[in-house]
Image (cartoon, rainbow, N blue to C red):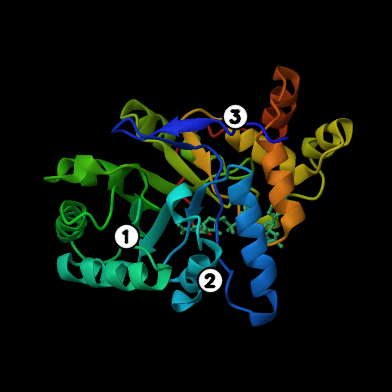
Amino acid sequence: MSHEIASVTLPDGERIPKLGQGTWEMGEQPSRRGAEIAALRAGIELGMTLIDTAEMYGEGRTETLLAEALDGLRDDVFLVSKVYPHNASKRGVQNACEDSLKRLCTDRLDLYLLHWRGNVPLEDTIAGMEALRDAGKIRHWGVSNFDTDDMEELVSLDGGDACATNQILYNVARRGPEFDLLPWLAERRMPAMAYSPVDHARLPKRSPLDSIADARGMSVFEIALAWVLAQPNVFAIPKAARIEHVRANYAASQIELTREEHAAIDAYFRPPRAKRALEML
Ligand SMILES: NC(=O)c1ccc[n+]([C@@H]2O[C@H](COP(=O)([O-])OP(=O)(O)OC[C@H]3O[C@@H](n4cnc5c(N)ncnc54)[C@H](OP(=O)(O)O)[C@@H]3O)[C@@H](O)[C@H]2O)c1
């Protein structure tokens, strides 16, 4: 029997699951298609109903695969996609969104993100996002890979304070955002969406995660994910194309690390003492 996954709250009060699913690198190899679809559907079944994708992933092929995975389940899912910075002008964002909607076989996105900051003025992107929201094509919009100074600039612009979230690289081995970006977001009740929460499977080989994992009969990935999920105002989107990883990620959402385990992790993966520029994978 599965137990519920905790939630976080968007600035407008809507609650979304603290644990979702990523899709980067899915849909690129025909031989893996069936397994990827099965993994996504198993995750939805377990309550990981927030799914992140992007027009960039597989140049649209990932969205097409996701449409197949969502067959009959679309209304159970909080669907997130992202626009390329070079498509993020007022008109461009609307065209890109229409293309994503077609590939995803849906009439709306629950959240649409600017993938990273490019050369288009933020005012234009905001105008495009707001027009999409008015037209009912997207329910919320946000940004990705924005550091604190970018966020400050965004919310100073007309309409910029409607931003719902910032999707950033954050995990136990990349704790830079804790210095000022996460507090900045928390102050505005804007949850951070942690991408690469198991560091793209590149966690350090020997660390306190090993002994914690051994003692609990779990993997270091599960412990690393449980650590991200323990952070307030943060939700995470691990990507797992293997069903056993999907189940493991769900299991991670069901444990609570002890104070001693947190202390051991902090002693090795030290919280930042100074500003570090936001990393991108
Ligand atoms: N906004 C951005 O710029 C940006 C950048 C990167 C990622 N993202 C989003 O965030 C999502 C997640 O990030 P990510 O894909 O970079 O990294 P990730 O989720 O940290 O790691 C994915 C890798 O870890 C493996 N994995 C997942 N769960 C595992 C588990 N329980 N045990 C062992 N291995 C496990 C996966 O294997 P299998 O797939 O073989 O199961 C895959 O190789 C992406 O898919 C994407 O949606 C956004």
Which residue bears the numbered disc 2?
65
Which x, y percent locates residue 85?
Answer: 31, 67
Quadrant of the rendered image holding ligand 1: bottom right
Which marked residue is nearer to the observer: mark 3 or mark 1? 3
Q: Is residue 221 visible?
A: yes
* Helix, strand or loop status at disc 3: loop
Q: Residue at image x 42%, y 67%? A: 104
Tell me if 153 is positioned left or right of 169 in this view. left
Q: Amino acid at mark 1?
A: Arg
Which residue bears the numbered disc 3?
230
- For the residues labelled 2 and 3, the Cα–Cα distance comes to 31 Å
Which x, y percent locates residue 80?
Answer: 41, 55
Q: Nearer the viewer, residue 40 or 23?
A: 40
Task: Work out which quarter of the rendered image holds the N terminus and state it.
Answer: top right
* Residue 189, image quadrant: top left
Q: Residue at image x 37%, y 47%? A: 147
Which residue is most to the bottom? 30
* Helix, strand or loop status at disc 1: loop
Which residue bears the numbered disc 1?
117
Label 3 vs 1, first from the N-terminus: 1
Query: Would the CB of label 1 be found within 8 Å of ligand 1?
Result: no
Q: Nearer the viewer, residue 248 or 156?
A: 248
Q: Amino acid at mark 2?
A: Leu
